[in-house]
Amino acid sequence: MFRKTAGLASALMLSTSLGACAQLSGLMPGQADATPPPPVAAAATPFEYVRDIHSHARPEIARVVHVDLDLSADFDAKVLSGAATLDVTAEPGATELILDARNLDIRSIKDGQGRALHFMMGENDPILGQAVRVHFPAFAAGERRRFIVDYATRPDAAALQWLNPSQTAGGQKPYLFSQGQAILTRTWVPTQDSPGIRQTWSARITAPSDLKVVMSAEALTPRGEAAGAGRTAWRFREPNPVPPYLIAVGVGDIAFEGIDERTGVWTEPSRLRAAHDELVPTADMVDKAEALYGPYRWGRYDLLVLPPSFPFGGMENPRMTFATPTIIAGDRSLVSLVAHELAHSWSGNLVTNATWSDFWLNEGFTVYFENRIMESVYGRDRAMQEQVLGWGDLQRTLASLPAADTRLKIDLTGRDPDDGLTDIAYEKGAAFLRTIERIAGRQRFDAWLRGYFDRHAFQPMTTEGFLKDIRENLIKGDATLESQLMMDAWIYQPGMPSNWVPPVSDAFVAVDAAARAFYADKGPASAVPWAGWNTQQRQRFLNWRPQGLAAGTDWLTEGQLADLERTLNLANEGNSELTFAWLQIALAHRYQPSVATAERFLTTMGRRKFVLPLFTTLWNEGDWGRPIATRIYAEARPLYHPVTTGSVDAVVGKPQ
């Protein structure tokens, strides 16, 4: 599928290490470390470069190894402007560097001595953006050069969301945050935007002095530094090489509260107490994760709880997970999301999918690891409930996708990499790893997985590289084990191989019985033991469907829906997962009283996991649902991040 270039990788896959920094003084809790993170370990096995079809870059010829940003945030113009200084290595004789950019205004590119360089902007591709071709005198062997790109973003940069004060909890000050995955970093940083091209980076971000700046890196100026009238600059560095999609920034009226000496929470001041109390388990999760698969290598682990428009549940930016406020349920019932993003510190951030067709290497490993953290913190019963819910999500996904897209490694040629963001990568990937664990034994599997993270730390990984590693370090020529694992079938064939065993949770036996009694036997909602269930059991109840139910079939009466809504108080449910599950039932039945709940839900958060399915459900209800969807979307769309609007526009259409 991808063309490999042999013999260049070892020379070009460079890692840079910064010397130990001097002891920082006057640190605010949660903002910087007194000592740098551990040095990058040498790779045991050099990564063989694979051409990324979602990048214009040719890193086997000339490669960005470090990015230094010096940008100013203009909230009136909704623009970041300044310079990106790129450190580049290249093959001897190379005369061209190719960068990725999308909707960037590049004003000039100069070399390290300030001499202007000739560059050309390629044709604009709707998915990939433009290739930026920079020409220069030929590189000498072993040479490293600096290129300075003077540029500005545009107000519609897809990675950036500029929020008006009214879109924040405080209502007084604006807010900015970035979301780079999968290929949106090129809309605010001119670099080689591929997960296989890891780069160290540093930054100086200038913003209005009444706002704070945080980034997915070590904070070098915890209190900022003067930068002119009414402006403050904030400096950061990330000495470990990361894929560009993990460069992230947040600017706003935010405050910090620590959980322990290396974990804490950032968010708007009015929400800090609730967010902190909800996320206290984070510290224990870090300890449990390290006990499973080795040391946390990024220094601090903090969370930035963003305004409601954040499009994902969480984003695993190193040192600082960006998280949706929809996880703040008041009872810590949704903290598995924290376990998931923390697990990415190993699977995804430490060892990264080399291309987006290998995305399951990020997410399948992370869902598996997340569940192991949950088991360590909350016990096996809770972990099994989460597994069963994920299995249900996977079955629905398998039924809804074309067969070709149910392979772990999928062909994304000519497609947006977001097409791979399905439960195939997440849940089928995790199911594959659980199958290996079950057949090989947990102790043996854990030893392999911990070694896998160590052997490939700070490297990209391909599916083929994974297969090579597990065959060399776990299977070790055991033909019987190889046959039992059916690895090629899991990865390259559609659907589920025959060696998968579905998870079972005893906690759901009574739930399923209550669901059948209400949904199938038409019993009263008052007989449902809702108050005695945890959130996962309540999700199971609301997700239950009669077997063999045809799409579009009404299986509840209006009276049953009213009974359910009233008795379980679903119109006022504060847990976002439960509200979503209820609305999926109610809207599919054209239950008119639920429209007000849907409108309130869809206009107060922008998490794509909830937004896209609900608008799809409404749209599928034709003459009843489409006018409702059109009206709500016209109101809600300005609140959503481009990641969310790009998906919903394809269903509802862009409002006129």
Image: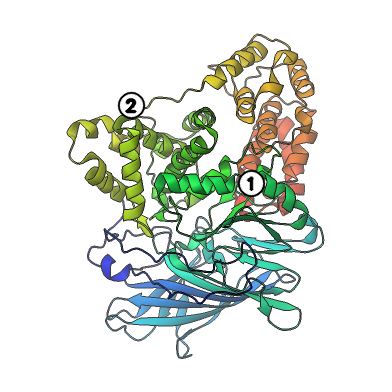
Whether residue 652 can be seen here:
no
Please state which of residues 558 and 41 is positioned toward the viewer in this rendering.
Answer: 41
Compared with residue 592, is residue 357 higher up or lower down, i.e. above or below?
Answer: below
Query: Which quarter of the picture shows residue 495?
Result: top left
Compared with residue 568, is residue 485 higher up or lower down, i.e. above or below?
Answer: below
Tell me the SS state at disc 1. loop
Please state which of residues 225 and 136 is positioned toward the viewer in this rendering.
Answer: 225
Please state which of residues 16 and 96 is positioned toward the viewer in this rendering.
Answer: 16
Query: Residue 410 at what x, y percent from top left?
Result: 39, 44
Disc number placed over residue 426 in the picture, else none: none
Residue for point 76% across, 57% down: 269
Q: Which residue is mark 1?
A: 279
Residue type (three-letter) at the residue carrying disc 1: Leu
Query: Which quarter of the picture shows residue 349?
Result: bottom left
263 lies left or right of 602: left
Query: Residue 45 at what x, y percent from top left?
Result: 26, 58
Please state which of residues 69 and 299 is positioned toward the viewer in this rendering.
Answer: 299
Query: Residue 201 at what x, y percent from top left?
Result: 49, 70
Going from the N terminus, do you reach mark 1 or mark 2 first?
1
Residue for point 46% across, 51% down: 415
Number of disc labels: 2
Query: Which quarter of the picture shows residue 98?
Result: bottom left
Residue type (three-letter) at the residue carrying disc 2: Asn
Tell me the SS state at disc 2. loop
556 lies left or right of 428: right
Query: Residue 426 at what x, y percent from top left?
Result: 47, 40
Whether residue 40 can be seen here:
yes
Instruction: Count neighbours of disc 2 (C-alpha within 10 A) and say few if under 14, some if 14 to 19, many if 20 or more.
Output: some
Q: Which residue is mark 2?
A: 499
> How far apart, in angstroms, are the residues tagged by discs 1 and 2?
37 Å
Q: Are marks 1 and 2 in contact (CB under 8 Å)?
A: no
